[in-house]
Structures are given as C-alpha cells and as structure tokens.
Image: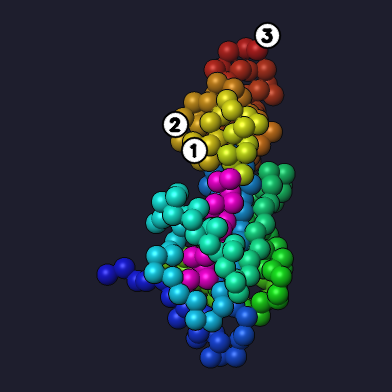
Amino acid sequence: MTARCTLEHEERLRAAGFTSIAGVDEAGRGPLAGPVVAAAVILPRGFEHPVLNDSKKLTARAREKFFAELQAAPGVLSAIVEVGIEEIDSLNILRATHEAMRRAVSALPVGADHAIIDGLPVKPFPIPQTALVGGDGLSLSVAAASVLAKVWRDMRMQALDAEYPQYAFAKHKGYGTALHLERLRAHGVSPVHRRSFAPVRELSLGSESGLRADGEVAR
C-alpha cells in the first residue's frame, strides 16, 4: 500500500521544539539544458490535501492546478529559486542543486528553523535539516515544494522554447530524449545547454575542433 502524504514528519519536528518547518525539493537535475530549480514551502498547521503528492506522480494539469492553489492559499509561505547554466557548469549539477536549495530556504518570507529535504543531506545548510528519501511522497511540505519547483521549471522551459524553437524545449523540458538529442545534433549547442553534461560537451568539443555535429569538417 502506498503511503499517503501527511504532516506527520512536520508534527514530529514541532513536538521536538521546532516551530517553522520548510519542505524543500528540486526539479531539473537531469536535463541537458535549462536551470535547476529549488522550492521551499512552509505549510500552516492542520493543512490537508487529499491528492497533493510527489509531482512526478501527478499529471501536468494537476501540477499546474496545485501550483496556483499553493501560491494563493492563505498561510502557505514559499520561495522558488533558479540556478542557471553558468553556475551548473562551474559548480557541477549536484553542488548547483544544493546551492539552489540553500537559497530557496534563505528566500522564504519568514525564517524557517528546520527543513525537511527530499533525498540525502545537503551540507552545508543554513538551518537544521531532516533528509527524507522519497520525502516528496511522504511529507506534504516536500510534496508542495516538489510541485512548485517542477511547474516553475516547466514554465521556464516553455519560455526558452519560444526563444529557441528549433530544440522543442516545450516538449521534452531539456531532458535527453531522442527528440532532444536529434535536435541537438542538427542545430548544435545553444546558450542554454549545459556544457558540462556529456552529450553536450561532446558536441561542443567537436564544434571547437572544426567538426559539425554530423562529424564532417566545417567549411
């Protein structure tokens, strides 16, 4: 039986003396293009939602609906932060993701005194943390952060699709799908591709050495 998202973990932390608990999650670690996004969410005590869950388990329409609800709900505090291509390529994606999480917690309109982070611990971190593997399917705060980060990033990729329509970012959101790789080989590397990621790096090196994406000598 699948566990339901609740505030159980948040209530345990409140019983331990913490008063403001933020759920933290990210979206966009795996793609070859676009930013990585992190969100932090503080839910009010007693918050309930019968359907809210890990964003990966929800349809795009449901995520967008919950995104709007969470942004408008009284008592829900949130922050969403992007870390862009330059930092991803200079730091590496894991460090860039951790930096996005730190910034998201620090950007909350009210300071949190504990964070529930989806996955493994983030070190260093500005406040005490509980790392919860699969947290976006267990904690409502983390699930809410998951939805905010995912929808925000999808909207960002749709905007990039308008700027670079040849890559079809609106369809694959920057992930390494067959369509994306085909467009990448056909059109080369754009300014929003992550050059530190292997498929992009290989094309970038080929371009720098005078080769086109198809392996022929550029003229």
Question: Residue farthest to the left?
Answer: 1
Q: Amino acid at mark 3?
A: Arg
Please, is residue 166 above or below residue 147 in the view? Answer: above
Q: Amino acid at mark 1?
A: His
Residue 172: assigned label? 1
Residue 178: assigned label? 2
Please, is residue 17 above or below residue 154 in the view? Answer: below
Residue 219: assigned label? 3
Q: Place residue 218 in its image quadrant.
A: top right
Q: Decide if residue 148 is on the left or right side of residue 86.
A: left
Real-space CA distance between mark 1 and mark 3, rounded to the nearest whole angstrom: 31 Å
Is any atom of residue 214 visible in this view? yes
Which is in the foreground here, disc 2 or disc 1? 1
Q: Which quadrant: the C terminus?
A: top right
Estimate the x, y position of residue 201 in percent, counting from the top left.
61, 34
Residue toward you, 148 or 120: 148
Residue toward you, 202 or 116: 116
Q: Which residues are magenta?
A: 139-155
Q: Main secondary structure of the magenta part?
A: helix
**Comes first in the chain, label 3 or label 2:** 2
Real-space CA distance between mark 3 and mark 2, rounded to the nearest whole angstrom: 28 Å
Q: Which residue is pictured at 63% across the width and 66% down the height?
A: 78
